[in-house]
Image (cartoon, rainbow, N blue to C red):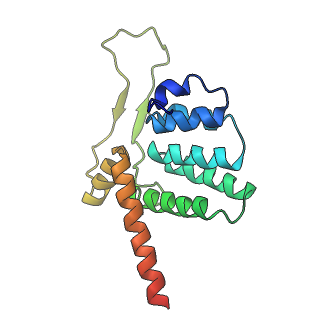
Amino acid sequence: MDRGDPAGAARFFEDPLRRGVAQYRAGEFKVAAASFGQDDSPEALYDRANALVMLGEYASAIASYGHALAKKPGWKEAKENMELAQHRLERLHPPHEGDQGTGGRLPPDKIVFDKKAGQASPDQKETVTGAPQRMSDAELRAMWLRRVQTRPEDFLRAKFSYQAARETGSEEKK
């Protein structure tokens, strides 16, 4: 770590928390989340949630922040990051008019499965039948946003925007 090689250092740490920190600093968020998951301390839960946010797994991150807060109530940073993850999740999956609890996803008209799995020829495919459904602009945007991977700079931009909005809102209440 002292030489600026967190990925190399991660291989030498036995402690899952220290190994996770090195993996996180190396940008290996998926393995960092797994390393943090080997420890159930509030700090490991918090760090795991941070790694999950970087992966765009906001719902899992929110749950991990919640577990950290249950073990360490009143933890300001965990609460703020949890609110930020909730805000980001809502922005990526906004409720829209006509959404009947489907989260913006339309159910299929019909799905047909091959009952002879592995016996079909390679050119046979699973079929989905029914008339194609036109999606509204809002549904298309929501579908596109669900597929967008969050980069660190996007996350930080959203975080600072959210914090600025919170500070402006608290000043107006005074």
Image: 68 above or below 32: below
Of 34 and 57, the residue lying toward us: 34
The residue that appears at 57% across and 54% down in the rendered structure is 62
Q: Position of residue 37 (x, y in %)?
A: 64, 37
As drawn, the residue found furthest toward the front would be: 2
x and y percentages locating residue 164 in the rendered image: 40, 72
Residue placed furthest toward the bottom: 174
> Percent x, y for residue 12?
59, 23
Which of 153/55 is in front? 153
- Return the x and y of residue 43 as percentages of the image width and height: 66, 48
**Of 144 and 132, which appears nearest the observer?**
144
**Horizontal side, residue 144 vs residue 54: left or right:** left
Count of labels shown?
Answer: 0
Q: Residue at x 53, y 31 (%)?
A: 31
Q: Can residue 164 be seen in this view?
A: yes
User: Quick check: can you spot residue 99?
Assistant: no
**Residue at the spot x=55%, y=64% of the render?**
80
Q: In this view, does 110 lie above or below 140?
A: above
Q: Which residue is drawn at 34% across and 52% down?
A: 154
Residue farthest to the right, as pictured: 71
Question: Residue 54 falls in which quadrant of the image?
Answer: top left
| Vertical order, 30 against 94 (above or below) | above
